[in-house]
Image (cartoon, rainbow, N blue to C red):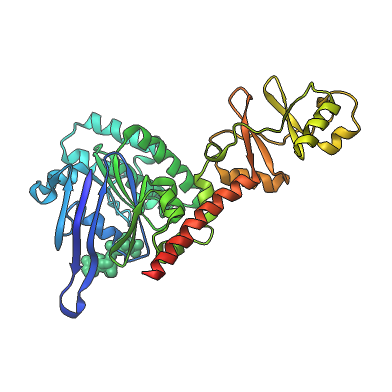
Amino acid sequence: MITYESVTKTFGKGINTVNALDNISFTIPKGEVVVFLGPSGCGKTTTLRLTNRLEELTGGTITIDGQNIMDLDVVELRQRLGYVIQAIGLFPNKTIAENIAVVPKLLGWDKERIRKRVDELLQMTNLDPDLYRDRYPAELSGGQQQRVGVARGLAADPEILLMDEPFGAIDPINREEIQDEFLKLQAKLKKTVAFVSHDIHEAIKMGDRIAIFNKGKLVQYDTPEMILTQPKNKFVSDFVGADRALKVLGLMRVSDIINRTPKNIIQGSDRSQAALDFLSNKQYRYGIVLEENRPIGFVTQKALKYEEGPVREVIETYPIFLKEHTPLRDVLSSMLMYDAITFCVVDGDKNFVGTVTYNDIQKAVKASYADEVENIENEVAQ
Ligand SMILES: Nc1ncnc2c1ncn2[C@@H]1O[C@H](COP(=O)(O)OP(=O)(O)OP(=O)(O)O)[C@@H](O)[C@H]1O
Ligand SMILES: [Mg+2]
């Protein structure tokens, strides 16, 4: 756990004074990833550099598990904190293996242990150890160098990771991949991570919480859901972007809005005439058709009118089925693609679990906008 309490940092003197951080207070809980997000120059890197004492605090305190960092030995402190710096900063005259091994070597690990750890970390960051361990940084692409930077930060298995735009130099496709790898790793290692980014998508994906900075102030510190659905002020909602509704849908899942007990259910073996009576009596435009509790399709009143046999003869099939964990953004995309307004949700055995309709999705989006309008109205009124 890292706690920042009234942290202030000024650079320079007199007319050259820069207030890089102004009275920042927040806590990074143990085992969580907190993303520092904000425009260039807002103080993200400075916050990391104060944490490992590469910069001196002007005011306030930083504690790690309750211990004031000023009371800790600076070398010991830095060993507990892995640091992935913004500019990658590999030593050009050292091989990749030597670069990764810097901290383990300082700690006096034996050669065999270091060799094993280097190969393990190269594999972890998707670099073939046989191909890369003996190369020099200049022989790697920017993205590959950045992976080595991440490997170096993790080398001595520090309890806390300070990562400054660790994937900034990696192209979008590989970035998605390394983000996924990192999240898998994090699910196992449960490090406490301060992760700097200027990319809202990355922040939403990687962060358990997001700290939004602007001009040295902490503007909002919340979960990604809260940042998207209840931005504290106009700066945050602008920063999050006009497509906030779509981002909210990326975070929400089918399980959040599923209707588990829709009433317009009919059985494939029902006679068409009986099914038609049922739908028209209840004024349902269409029915979901189940057989042995599995959805086999849907049927409209119109299709049933001219059928003598069982319902299963006239059904239209669904192009896809949803799972409970499907993000709503993907559901909406499928609805547009297949021109459909309802999909069925199934479990692993294809049993019927419920439905999601276009209306339900729209309601979820509207709810998030209602919060924003209220917040901004309050702000204007204050
Ligand atoms: N050593 C320094 N001397 C003087 N000013 C500094 C120093 N380091 C940072 N600053 C200033 O402090 C402010 C915050 O800088 P910081 O590097 O923390 O920004 P950042 O949020 O990391 O930005 P970026 O997204 O561009 O990396 C900036 O105005 C910067 O110019
Ligand atoms: Mg920076």
Q: Is residue 36 left or right of residue 327?
A: left
Residue 177 visible to an observer of this rendering: yes
Dividing the picture into quadrants, the one containing residue 309 is top right
Residue 127 visible to an observer of this rendering: no
Of the pair 148 and 259, the residue shown nearer to us: 259
View extreme (top): residue: 292
Dividing the picture into quadrants, the one containing residue 56 is bottom left
Q: Position of residue 296 (x, y in %)?
A: 73, 27
Quadrant of image for the N terminus: top left
Of the pair 106 and 216, the residue shown nearer to us: 216
Of the pair 45 and 107, the residue shown nearer to us: 45
Please give the name of the residue rendered at 72% of the width and 36% of the height, measured from the top-left corner. 319
Of the pair 311 and 327, the residue shown nearer to us: 311
Please give the name of the residue rendered at 41% of the width and 36% of the height, measured from the top-left corner. 184
- Which corner quadrant of the figure contains ligand 1? bottom left
Q: Position of residue 4 (x, y in %)?
A: 21, 53
Quadrant of image for the C terminus: bottom left
Q: Is residue 253 above or below residue 214?
A: above
Q: Position of residue 142 (x, y in %)?
A: 41, 53
Please give the name of the residue rendered at 24% of the width and 39% of the height, measured from the top-left corner. 158
